[in-house]
Image (tube, rainbow, N blue to C red):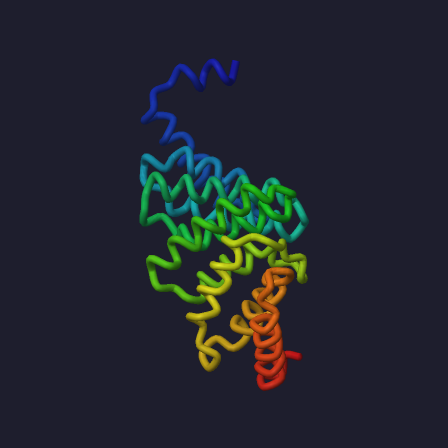
Amino acid sequence: IRATAYASIGLVQRVQLHRKIGEVLADTDGDLDLDALAHHFLAAAPGGTAGMAYEYAVAAARSAMKVLAYENAALRYEQALTAIDLDSSAGDRTAALLGLGEARAASGDPTGARTAYLAAADRARAAADTARLAEAALGLAKGHGFDVPLFDQTQIDLLDEAFSQLNPTDDPELRVLVGARLSVALSLTGRDERRRQLSGDAVGLARSIGKE
């Protein structure tokens, strides 16, 4: 009955209904239902709530990541990206793509994670955002410990690109991480001298900033 009633109302009424429900939920005392808020404000986005949908979707994704609900987190980041598709000013697409990559990787979807990280890298490169380019490179190289896939030229090229742009003075920690991972990614590629140099430089820089 509920579904039939919902289907019988027009688009404008649906948008207004979802917005009203979202506003009521947002004004509720106690813990907010972030998933529901993201859903309703996204459904109401044609009425100008895309920014709110983005914010609640990202908050829901981060909350899901904390409790290891990785698949749900990925869905929420996808909602955040949908909000931006509806209104380009709704939020930060690069940040959402990086979050989506992390969530997909954690949920056991390496192909989906790779797609998200490469898209984030493209945007970071276009914006000359070196830090986020490095984050995308680290994500593509797994980002968890040193479980770095070998013989992946795309990964090597992205790590190398990020490493070359990171200033050891301005971004020492990121340069250490990217350099160290690049040295691992180059394993068994015949570039042992470069690997040793990268590894040694990473250790030296880490020591200089107290990050051994």
Figure check: 181 above or below 209: above
The residue that appears at 39% across and 58% down in the rendered structure is 124
Q: Position of residue 80 (x, y in %)?
A: 45, 44
Name the foreground residue: 132 vs 3.
132
Q: Is residue 27 visible?
A: no
Name the foreground residue: 19 vs 156.
156
Q: How many marks?
A: 0
Figure check: 152 above or below 69: below
The residue that appears at 52% across and 55% down in the rendered structure is 155
The residue that appears at 44% across and 77% down in the rendered structure is 167
Residue projecting furthest to the front: 190
Q: Position of residue 72 (x, y in %)?
A: 60, 40
Name the foreground residue: 4 vs 184.
184
Name the foreground residue: 169 vs 46.
169
Which image quarter: residue 143?
bottom right
Q: Tell me if 95 is positioned left or right of 48 in this view.
A: right
The residue that appears at 58% across and 83% down in the rendered structure is 209
Q: Position of residue 202 (x, y in %)?
A: 59, 76
Q: Quadrant of the C terminus?
A: bottom right
Residue projecting furthest to the bottom: 208
Which image quarter: residue 192?
bottom right
Q: Position of residue 91 (x, y in %)?
A: 38, 51
Q: Is residue 103 visible?
A: yes
Q: Tell me if 132 is positioned left or right of 64 in this view.
A: left
Figure check: 114 above or below 179: above
Q: Tell me if 124 is positioned left or right of 194 in this view.
A: left
